[in-house]
């Protein structure tokens, strides 16, 4: 009897492997998003807000955030400008909530949407 259903296990292996790759990719992207949030909205952003005000800190770090993504595969100037605008949005969310968790969730969601296209 087991001989008749042996093909069932082999059919599931590629699906399991694909699922494992997707899960691994999402974990890597989640970690990358957290690191970027610590760099761009963490301590440096908060100190810059104290030094030059919220608007100045948003402009400087959103620009750095955008141009920091310029080396991404297939990056264009429009992609960089879009990333700068996303950096502005993330900074505003951080200033409103004072939570890196909220911004990390947004950032991770954006990565997941791009990765799962």
Image (spheres, rainbow, N blue to C red):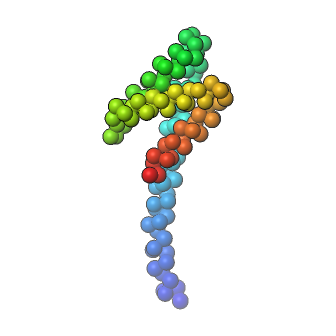
Whether residue 5 can be seen here: yes
Q: Who's the residue at 39% across and 35% down the image?
A: 79
Q: Residue furthest bottom?
A: 1
Please state the horizontal and vertical placement of residue 13, each as a whole percent of the image.
Answer: 46, 68
In the picture, measured across the screen, residue 115 lies left or right of residue 38, that is left
Query: In the image, is residue 107 above or below residue 94?
Result: below
Occupied quadrant, residue 106: top right
Q: Residue at x 54, y 30 (%)?
A: 89
User: Does residue 39 show up?
Assistant: no
Outermost residue, top direction?
51
Q: 6 or 47: nearer the eye? A: 47
Number of residue marks: 0
Q: Nearer the viewer, residue 49 or 15?
A: 49
- Image location (x, y in percent) of residue 114: 45, 46
**Which residue occupies 34% across, 37% down?**
75
Determine whether 26 is above or below 31 in the image. Answer: below
Q: Where in the figure is residue 53, as x and y percent of width and height?
A: 58, 13
Most foreground residue, 80 or 16: 80
Q: Nearer the viewer, residue 67 or 30?
A: 67
Is 100 displayed left or right of 77 in the figure?
Answer: right
């Amino acid at each position: 009897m087991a001989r008749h259903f042996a093909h069932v296990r082999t059919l599931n292996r590629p699906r399991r492997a694909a699922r494992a790759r997707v899960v691994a990719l999402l974990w890597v992207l989640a970690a990358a998003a957290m690191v970027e949030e610590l760099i761009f909205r963490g301590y440096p952003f908060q100190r810059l807000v104290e030094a030059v005000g919220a608007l100045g800190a948003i402009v400087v770090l959103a620009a750095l955030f955008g141009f920091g993504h310029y080396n991404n595969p297939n990056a264009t100037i429009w992609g960089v400008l879009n990333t700068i605008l996303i950096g502005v949005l993330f900074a505003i969310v951080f200033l409103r909530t004072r939570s890196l968790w909220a911004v990390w969730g947004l950032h991770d969601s954006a990565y997941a949407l791009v990765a799962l296209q």
